[in-house]
Amino acid sequence: MNKALLGLLMVAPLFADRDMDERNKWMSESAVTLREITNAGDRGIPEHLIRRAECVGVIPNLKRAGFIVGAKYGKGVLTCRTQGGWSAPAIMRIEGGSIGLQIGAGETDVVLLVMNESGKNRLMHDKFTVGGDASVMAGPVGRSTQAETDATMRAEILAYSRSRGLFGGVSLEGATLRPDNDDDAKIYGRPVTVEEILHGHVTPPPAASGLYSELNRFPYEGH
């Protein structure tokens, strides 16, 4: 056998394992991010909002960079409630930019609460624009319901962020959110649609167990 070909055959599994480790890392980091943000006490996401959420998305380490033109991009996981519990996670990609004076760079953890069926249905699209195709607003912080307004209750998605220890609601106006079909296919061993995943028709991977442990702390309360 050609030595070059033999070398490629030996190296290919290593790259495959590395890719899978990277995808598993998004799930484990999402679990850690969710735990830290929900344990933030009066500075955290109101628990009753998580209990009412139809889906939860976590994008750890969303990257922000730029001078004059600010950009944002990152990957994370999204899971929705089903009759049998939480769905398998779908890998989601968030991308977008904003024009303005933005100096510096950093990383931000983002949590999205999808609050109703309308917002959940948006996720089934190949791509949607935050603030354009979907009603998204910065979520209220703390344990009190006083921060909730009519706008909060009507929002399809509530968004939160944490950067350098600071936590609060965040505007993602103009960003796009879409499923990463290539990564989903590699995780689940076959091409799958985001509808299959979020409707509970795909077996969850073992790497998602930590994420489920955090989510199961907040049983569904409905609307």
Image (tube, helix red, strand yellow):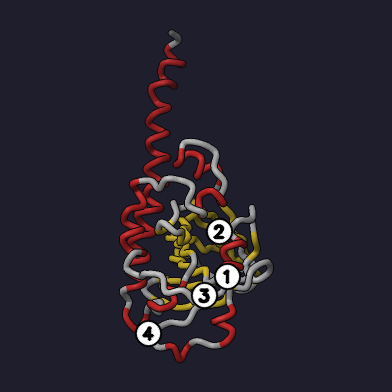
Question: Mark 4 and mark 1: span between their CA atoms?
Answer: 23 Å
Q: Residue furthest bottom?
A: 146
Does residue 70 appear left or right of residue 61 in this picture? right
Residue at 61% of width from left, 68% of height from top?
Answer: 118
Q: Given the current orientation, which residue lies at the most extreme right position?
A: 132
- Looking at the rendered structure, the secondary structure element under dot 4 is loop
In the displayed structure, 96 sits above or below 135; it is above
Left or right: 179 in relation to 165 = right
Report if the CB atoms under discs 3 and 2 are less than 8 Å apart.
Answer: no
Q: Which residue is mark 1?
A: 172
The residue that mark 3 highlights is: 170
Residue 87 on image: x %, y %? 44, 55
Q: Nearer the viewer, mark 4 or mark 1?
A: 4
Task: Say above or below: 148 vs 14.
Answer: below
- Looking at the rendered structure, the secondary structure element under dot 2 is strand
Residue that mark 4 sits on: 143
Neighbour tally class for label 3: few under 14, some 14-19, many 20 plus, Cα within 10 Å:
some
Q: Residue at x 37, y 84 (%)?
A: 143
Left or right: where does residue 24 sit relative to residue 184?
Answer: left
Q: Amino acid at mark 2?
A: Ile
